[in-house]
């Protein structure tokens, strides 16, 4: 790892620390993500092997943060079995959360330009479609995980891939609370067989947040999270979502009526509201897929040839 | 879901889409040995015999560890890529064995197949301790930059078969099966190593078609050669090499049949048969003149010799060269 000069810790990813660093030879900025590699009698753990190689393959897409290389460092000198793995990613200096914050607070609060929201959402759908077409769920999509190249107007999905070997924890290893705001209702209700639709729920929440400049469902516990959702979209019924009342964590909730979604995203065009409502369908089977979303009329005015 | 399938390395959920296909063609070169490697193999006997020995060991693992041919193919791919990026110090006969164990182990993990270090080593008569194997695995992973979902000729079979207007599923299966066999055989052929996986896949299917459905060959050939992703000249070059390989194989097996019925050679075990067969395959076209029965005997003895002394060398003596 002498090749890199660590500059600062830029975050705690869900699975480990992330550092901003500089490649000493080229001067290129990179993000180093450190993960422990737990070795046993059988050598390199198969899950780590499959996850990292999957990540290596997925990062071929322009809309996924590029994995530049993988470095391992042995920490134990006496014939030991511990190793740290550093995933070396391209470095982008901003993410969608910071970007939205800068439009809400600070010297010049202003809405995000509608054409930019449209472009970011399309790129997000494209990246998610890429993951899904390779059989990979992200499961933790949120504005902090969407990195931006402001000059080129490019959005890239980060922090993916290492999701399946380990279940998504409620608390990260540093006991930082993992945000629930983008979590799909079926996950909150304890469904064990969830699918690509969980990511589309998150995409919907992120879409609304770009328009509103604040989170759509800012819950601080799993229960509160559900109530936020139910108050806007109405308490789900068996008719709307067959099987919902048999989910593990289903309880009897107050019966809220659905509100008008338009009022939650006042500046959004009718096509935009229609797409959002399809991303926030309760029944995962009915929720729009990333690929279908890319063909939605909301994107008709977008020049797709640039992507 | 994340088990690695050589025929579908990109794990596309909804079959072969156009963007999946172009992704396959654009990244296949990342999964090949470097160009220097082909030059090395053509000029250095050390590398030729190192590779042959490694392949023999990997093939033998099917008996001791019940490995399927795809896992073995993957292990050979890792081994080739590793050697092409790392200089192998000469005079350390244990290196080939340690490398083979690490490559098989990694391939088995990718395929979610159980592989026991100790069973394999017991059968082969050598014993590395787990930390040494681990470190070798990490060296291989470093050299391959963790690109373990290799794109191989098998990855292109479905795509090329779709160009072939066969309506009958059993016929399609027959074509695939024959092409698959040709691809396994081609792995041992040094002359064929430098072709991209897609070229190998296309040529193997063409050759299979030529053998099984000669009447449809011209139209299949036209559609493969007009495919936007393949270089026509390379396919023809590869096809010719492969045809030669298959013809040599046939004539050799006839010679073998004749000689085995008349010679005093004691019947050998299945394992030995397999060993010498793979050696033949590995050398037949360019090296045809150097492969003599004596030569084969020497190789077999050499292999047995290796098995007799156990290795206590440490991988730390094996430094990766930048």
Image: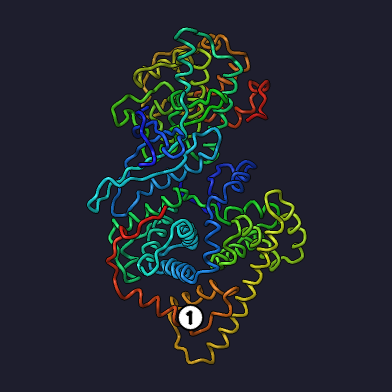
Residue lying at 53% horizontally and 83% vertically, measured from the top left:
B292
Q: Is residue B86 above or below residue B120?
A: above
Whether residue A20 is situated above or below residue B81 in the rendered picture: above
Q: Quadrant of residue A235?
A: top left
* Res A262 quadrant in image: top right
The residue that label 1 is drawn on is B296
Residue B286 in percent (x, y) is at 59, 73
Q: Position of residue A192 (x, y in %)?
A: 40, 34
Q: Is residue B285 above or below residue A171?
A: below
- Number of numbered discs: 1
Q: Residue at x 51, y 76 (%)?
A: B277
User: What colour scheme governs how the chains and residues are painted in the rendered image of this protein?
Assistant: rainbow
Residue at image location 65% in from the left, 68% down from the top: B241
Residue B77 visible to the viewer: yes
Q: Is residue B165 visible?
A: no
In the figure, residue A10 lies in which quadrant? top left
In terms of secondary structure, where does tag 1 sit?
helix
Residue closer to the observer: A258 or A79: A79
The reply, left or right, for residue B221 in relation to residue A239 is right
Q: Nearer the viewer, residue B285 or B3?
A: B285
User: Where residue B201 appears, x then y in whole percent?
Assistant: 62, 58
- Outermost left residue: A78
Q: Chain of mark 1?
A: B
Could you tell me residue B250's position as x and y percent? Answer: 62, 77
Label 1 Cα neighbours within 10 Å, binned few <14 / some 14-19 / many ≥20: some
């Amino acid at each position: 790892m002498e090749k890199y000069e660590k500059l600062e810790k830029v975050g705690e990813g869900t699975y480990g620390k992330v550092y901003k660093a500089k490649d000493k030879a080229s001067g290129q900025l990179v993000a180093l993500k450190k993960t422990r590699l737990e070795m046993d009698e059988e050598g390199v753990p198969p899950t780590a092997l499959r996850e990292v190689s999957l990540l290596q393959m997925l990062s071929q897409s322009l809309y996924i943060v590029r994995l530049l290389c993988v470095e391992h460092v042995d920490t134990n000198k006496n014939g030991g079995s511990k190793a740290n793995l550093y995933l070396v990613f391209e470095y982008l200096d901003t993410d969608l959360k910071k970007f939205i914050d800068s439009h809400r607070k600070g010297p010049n609060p202003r809405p995000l330009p509608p054409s930019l929201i449209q472009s970011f959402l399309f790129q997000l759908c494209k990246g998610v479609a890429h993951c899904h077409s390779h059989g990979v769920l992200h499961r933790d999509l949120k504005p902090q995980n969407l990195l931006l190249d402001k000059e080129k107007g490019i959005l890239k999905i980060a922090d993916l891939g290492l999701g399946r070997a380990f279940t998504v924890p409620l608390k990260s290893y540093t006991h930082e609370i993992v945000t629930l705001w983008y979590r799909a209702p079926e996950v909150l209700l304890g469904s064990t067989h969830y699918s690509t639709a969980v990511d589309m729920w998150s995409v919907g929440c992120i879409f609304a947040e770009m328009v509103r400049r604040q989170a759509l469902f800012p819950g601080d516990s799993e229960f509160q999270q559900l109530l936020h959702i139910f108050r806007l979209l109405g308490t789900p019924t068996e008719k709307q979502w067959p099987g919902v009342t048999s989910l593990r964590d289903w309880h009897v909730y107050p019966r809220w009526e659905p509100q008008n979604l338009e009022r939650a995203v006042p500046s959004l065009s009718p096509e935009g509201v229609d797409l959002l409502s399809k991303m926030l369908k309760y029944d995962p089977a009915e929720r729009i897929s990333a690929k279908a979303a890319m063909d939605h009329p909301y994107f008709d005015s977008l020049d797709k040839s640039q992507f | 879901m994340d088990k690695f399938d050589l025929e579908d390395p990109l794990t596309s959920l909804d079959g072969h889409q156009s963007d999946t296909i172009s992704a396959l063609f654009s990244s296949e070169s990342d999964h090949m040995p470097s160009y220097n490697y082909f030059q090395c193999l053509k000029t250095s006997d050390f590398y030729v015999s190192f590779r042959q020995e490694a392949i023999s060991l990997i093939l033998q693992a099917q008996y001791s560890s019940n490995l399927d041919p795809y896992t073995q193919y993957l292990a050979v791919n890792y081994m080739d890529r590793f050697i092409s990026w790392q200089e192998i110090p000469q005079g350390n006969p244990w290196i080939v064995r340690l490398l083979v164990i690490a490559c098989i182990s990694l391939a088995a993990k990718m395929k979610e197949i159980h592989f026991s270090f100790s069973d394999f080593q017991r059968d082969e008569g050598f014993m590395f301790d787990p930390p040494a194997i681990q470190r070798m695995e990490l060296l291989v992973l470093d050299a391959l930059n963790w690109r373990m979902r290799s794109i191989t000729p098998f990855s292109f079979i479905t795509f090329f078969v779709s160009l072939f207007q066969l309506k009958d599923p059993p016929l399609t299966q027959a074509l695939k099966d024959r092409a698959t066999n040709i691809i396994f055989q081609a792995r041992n052929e040094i002359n064929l190593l430098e072709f991209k996986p897609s070229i190998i896949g296309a040529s193997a299917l063409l050759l299979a078609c030529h053998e099984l459905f000669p009447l449809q060959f011209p139209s299949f050939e036209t559609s493969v050669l007009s495919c936007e992703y393949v270089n026509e000249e390379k396919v023809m070059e590869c096809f010719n090499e492969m045809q030669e390989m298959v013809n040599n194989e046939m004539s050799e097996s006839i010679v073998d049949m004749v000689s085995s019925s008349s010679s005093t050679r004691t019947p050998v075990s299945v394992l030995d048969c397999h060993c010498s067969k793979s050696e033949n395959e590995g050398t037949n076209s360019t090296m045809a003149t150097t492969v003599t029965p004596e030569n084969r005997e020497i190789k077999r003895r050499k292999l047995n010799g290796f098995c007799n002394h156990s290795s206590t060398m440490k991988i730390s003596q094996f430094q990766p060269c930048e």
